[in-house]
Image (tube, rainbow, N blue to C red):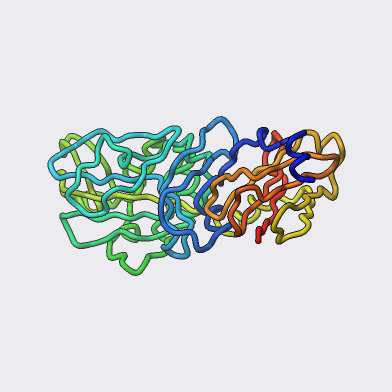
């Protein structure tokens, strides 16, 4: 039955990839997903392409997306890189490396930060100049808005942060000044700033210092430094994004070993014609089983898929309509 249906109408050719929008969605789908590089689509099928990103699936429960990564070598001052349609990956995490002009160097600009859903930020950094570590998270709404738009400031973050176990820096608690409206450089130009004492600053130049790379200090030189910023979407919000159940789905049988029927319980015929299916494995990679459209339902065949848990997303041109777990025996 399934073979003949596939020969006549194989809908799988119409599928398009719609990856998770951030590492939080990947972690929600698969809490045991490891740290590493994944594919995300920040604007969920909009004009931005699907891109690679580094996901921290361990720290503080996981789900962090890397949006700024600079491993800077002493006595150098290479230009910063603003990403508009990709993200920096993580290379070396020790000091003393020059990663300028590599895929490991740069930060997301405001257009990309606006597209990525997040409501938490994590700062991480250290320098050869001292033995202190900046490592904290914040859900400070002013900072979130500032990093998304480049307009505003981080004012108020000093009283709204949670340090991690290895956090030993004076910042952000010691902040007494705020830089404003730095645009694409909101994350690099004084987001953490105690006047002439403790700074978070990357690649800065002013009349007093020909160049500066600073992590909780004010060296007025260019020591080796390591700066990172990660963002995360609240678990509850991630669940809402993945489970926009405007259309109720029923998959039977589930689990299945050969094929199953995906029925749309509350859709109209004209809606059904505009819908399509995307199926992903537990790490957010799209897979392509045999999918056949019929009148009011889809037939999904196991094809070459290995036994395991998958997620079947129903979507139209406006985005994801509903998601259901699919188990293959």
- Which of 311/52 is in front? 311
- Which of 279/122 is in front? 279
Count of labels in the image = 0
Taking 1 as reference, is 213 left or right?
left
Task: Give coordinates of residue 49: x percent, y percent.
Answer: 51, 33
Taking 216 as reference, is 121 left or right?
right
Query: Which residue lies at the image location 19% right of the left edge and 50% below the top edge?
Result: 218
Q: Quadrant of residue 102?
A: top left
Q: Which quadrant: the C terminus? A: bottom right
Query: Which residue lies at the image location 45% right of the left edge and 43% below the top edge?
Result: 147
Query: Which residue lies at the image location 53% right of the left edge and 41% below the top edge?
Result: 42
Q: Which quadrant: the N terminus? A: top right
- Which of 224/156 is in front? 224
Taking 243 as reference, is 212 left or right?
left
Is residue 321 in view from this perspective? yes
Taking 222 as reference, is 289 left or right?
right
Q: In which quarter of the image is residue 76?
A: top left
Is residue 220 in view from this perspective? no
Task: Give coordinates of residue 202: x percent, y percent.
Answer: 27, 42
Q: In which quarter of the image is residue 81?
A: top left
Task: Give coordinates of residue 148: x percent, y percent.
Answer: 48, 41
Residue at the top extreme, as displayed:
47
Task: Give coordinates of residue 205: x percent, y percent.
Answer: 22, 36
């Amino acid at each position: 039955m399934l073979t003949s249906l596939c020969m006549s109408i194989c809908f799988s050719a119409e599928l398009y990839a719609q990856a998770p929008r951030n590492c939080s969605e990947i972690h929600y789908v698969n809490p045991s997903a490891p740290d590493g590089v994944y594919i995300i689509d920040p604007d969920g099928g909009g004009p931005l392409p699907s891109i690679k990103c580094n996901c921290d699936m361990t720290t503080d429960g996981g789900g962090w997306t890397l949006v700024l990564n600079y491993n800077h070598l002493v006595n150098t001052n290479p230009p910063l890189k603003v990403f508009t349609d990709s993200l920096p990956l993580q290379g070396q995490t020790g000091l003393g490396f020059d990663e300028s002009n590599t895929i490991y160097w740069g930060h997301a600009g405001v257009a990309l930060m606006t597209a990525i859903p997040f409501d938490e930020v994590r700062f991480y950094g250290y320098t050869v100049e001292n033995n202190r570590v900046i490592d904290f998270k914040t859900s400070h709404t002013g900072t979130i808005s500032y990093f998304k738009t480049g307009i505003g400031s981080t004012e108020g973050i000093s009283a709204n942060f949670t340090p991690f176990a290895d956090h030993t820096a004076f910042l952000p608690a010691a902040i007494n000044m705020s830089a404003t409206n730095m645009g694409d450089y909101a994350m690099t130009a004084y987001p953490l700033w105690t006047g002439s004492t403790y700074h978070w600053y990357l690649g800065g130049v002013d009349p007093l210092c020909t160049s500066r790379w600073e992590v909780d200090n004010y060296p007025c030189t260019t020591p080796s430094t390591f700066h990172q910023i990660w963002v995360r979407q609240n678990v509850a919000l991630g669940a809402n994004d993945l489970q926009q159940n405007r259309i109720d789905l029923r998959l039977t049988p589930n689990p299945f070993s050969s094929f199953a029927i995906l029925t749309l319980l509350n859709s109209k015929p004209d809606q059904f014609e505009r819908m399509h299916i995307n199926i992903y494995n537990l790490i957010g990679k799209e897979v392509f089983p045999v999918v056949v459209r019929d009148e009011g339902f889809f037939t999904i065949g196991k094809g070459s898929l290995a036994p395991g848990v998958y997620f079947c997303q129903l979507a139209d041109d406006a985005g994801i309509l509903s998601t259901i777990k699919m188990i293959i025996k």
